[in-house]
């Protein structure tokens, strides 16, 4: 099988590295894999190539080590990335700041700018840069394209994008709501319209991207009008290691009373909070296992997670006025049937009625999990950020 013209997509998350070798036109996937729990105990790589899947538990202290092992696995499977005729390497980059809101061909200036704004996404942009540099060393002659998570939300209404801060300070320091997971929110809302057989321009949707990082969006006619993440990916929903929304006064309290430095507070809120802070586990599957064992801290963590999720669901329902579809996506959203049920419980008066049997089905396909009589369609839509990134990267190369 020829892989010429394919795009190698690297999607480095806060504790993961998802990769895929995919042809943007035929959608044929030649190889793919996932490095999980990077920087944590129990890290592993699952790699699928030539119809065979390999899973190995291996120490992955950082993203660089993970990428180097991924390149070795490609070679062991008979794919020399350097001579494969790749069209591009497409990199998911979380934060584009005010500078980047379109897919961009990567050069030294672009890398320096991504590094300059890394403070806006401290868990992600540094990892993205590691992937960019490692791939650049391995594949120096293959064009590299950055696709920014913030791009989809660049045109948020001013009322949603603006924080109630001194406007001079906000302007000087580029403080606004940027939003994240935009590639996923855009892809999922488009796939939902296809599944429902309706024009995207006529649908009002709430998309819930629930993974180790989690975000919600309200999308009217294909255009986002609000999203839960803010200037950084720290705001919004409860996440694996991130707190999501907290009273800003807590930050001052931690500094003045607990005597924590800015860096210590950053680490606390980004890496030691969320589910991990509440019960010691950041992986949703581990939290669920603890609950089944009767762990009260895990149950509280779960309840806080659901409470925050329902809070945003209600807010966006009012924002949109009319709701046509709710879409669950990403690792937790696609697989945690119990969470979906708990999130949507007792919402019949809002036209949201879940079908327990449909909800319990596990599938990699887009599917409806609401009843036939539900006024609002509830869908599980597997995200495919890799395909979306591959297509955008290929287009940039074609236009350059």
Image (tube, grey):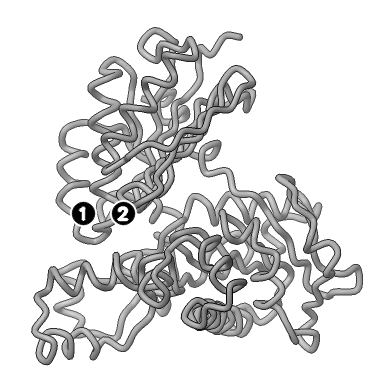
- The extreme front residue here reads 293
Residue 171 x %, y %: 19, 72
Mark 2 secondary-structure assignment = loop
Q: Residues within 10 Å of mark 2 (few under 14, many from 20)?
A: many
Q: Is residue 315 left or right of residue 347?
A: left
Q: Nearer the viewer, residue 122 or 140?
A: 122
Marks 2 and 1, the one that precedes in the sequence: 2
Answer left or right for 61 relative to 243: left
Question: 237 or 177, which lies in front?
Answer: 237
**Residue tagged 2:** 95
Disc 1: which residue = 118
Give the percent coordinates (x, y) of residue 277: 35, 74
In the displayed structure, would residue 387 be above or below residue 366?
above
The residue lying at 61 percent from left, 61 percent from top is 333
Secondary structure of the residue carrying tag 1 is helix
Is there any visible trace of residue 161 in the rendered image? no
Q: Is residue 34 visible?
A: yes
Residue 306, located in which quarter of the rendered image?
Answer: bottom right
Count up the numbered dots. Answer: 2
- Split into 4 quadrants, where in the image is the N terminus? top right
Q: Are marks 2 and 1 in contact (CB under 8 Å)?
A: yes
The answer to which quarter of the image holds residue 150 is bottom left
Residue at x 44%, y 74% (from the top left corner): 238
The CA distance from mark 2 to mark 1 is 8 Å
Q: Position of residue 8 (x, y in %)?
A: 44, 26
């Amino acid at each position: 099988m020829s892989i010429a013209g394919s795009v190698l997509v690297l999607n480095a998350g806060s504790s993961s590295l998802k990769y895929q070798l995919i042809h943007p036109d035929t959608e044929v996937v030649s190889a793919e894999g996932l490095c999980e729990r990077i920087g944590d105990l129990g890290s592993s790589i699952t790699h699928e190539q030539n119809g065979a899947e390999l899973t190995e538990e291996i120490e992955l202290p950082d993203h660089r080590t993970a990428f180097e092992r991924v390149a070795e696995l490609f070679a062991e499977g008979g794919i020399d990335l350097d001579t494969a005729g790749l069209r591009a390497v497409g990199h998911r980059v979380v934060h584009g700041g005010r500078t980047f809101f379109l897919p961009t061909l990567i050069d030294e200036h672009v890398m320096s700018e991504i590094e300059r704004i890394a403070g806006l996404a401290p868990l992600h942009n540094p990892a993205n840069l590691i992937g960019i540099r490692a791939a650049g060393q391995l594949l120096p002659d293959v064009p590299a394209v950055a696709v920014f998570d913030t791009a989809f939300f660049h045109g948020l209404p001013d009322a949603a994008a603006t924080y109630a801060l001194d406007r001079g300070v906000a302007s000087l320091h580029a403080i606004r709501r940027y939003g994240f997971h935009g590639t996923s929110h855009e892809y999922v809302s488009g796939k939902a319209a296809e599944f429902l057989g309706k024009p995207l321009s006529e649908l009002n949707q709430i998309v819930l991207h629930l993974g180790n990082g989690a975000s919600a969006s309200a999308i009217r006619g294909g255009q986002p009008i609000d999203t839960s993440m803010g200037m950084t990916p720290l705001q919004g929903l409860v996440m694996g290691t991130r707190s999501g929304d907290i009273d800003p006064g807590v930050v001052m309290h931690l500094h003045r009373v607990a005597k924590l430095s800015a860096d210590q507070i950053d680490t606390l809120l980004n890496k030691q909070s969320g589910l991990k802070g509440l019960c010691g586990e950041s992986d949703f599957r581990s939290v669920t296992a603890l609950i089944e064992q009767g762990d009260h801290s895990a149950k509280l963590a779960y309840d806080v997670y659901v409470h925050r999720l329902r809070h945003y669901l209600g807010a966006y329902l009012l924002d949109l006025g009319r709701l046509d579809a709710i879409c669950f996506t990403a690792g937790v959203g696609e697989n945690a049937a119990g969470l979906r049920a708990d999130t949507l419980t007792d919402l019949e008066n809002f036209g949201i009625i879940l079908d327990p049997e449909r909800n319990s089905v596990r599938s990699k396909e887009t599917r409806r999990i609401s009843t036939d009589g539900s006024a609002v369609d509830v869908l599980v839509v597997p995200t495919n950020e890799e395909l979306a990134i591959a297509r955008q990267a290929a287009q940039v190369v074609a236009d350059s």
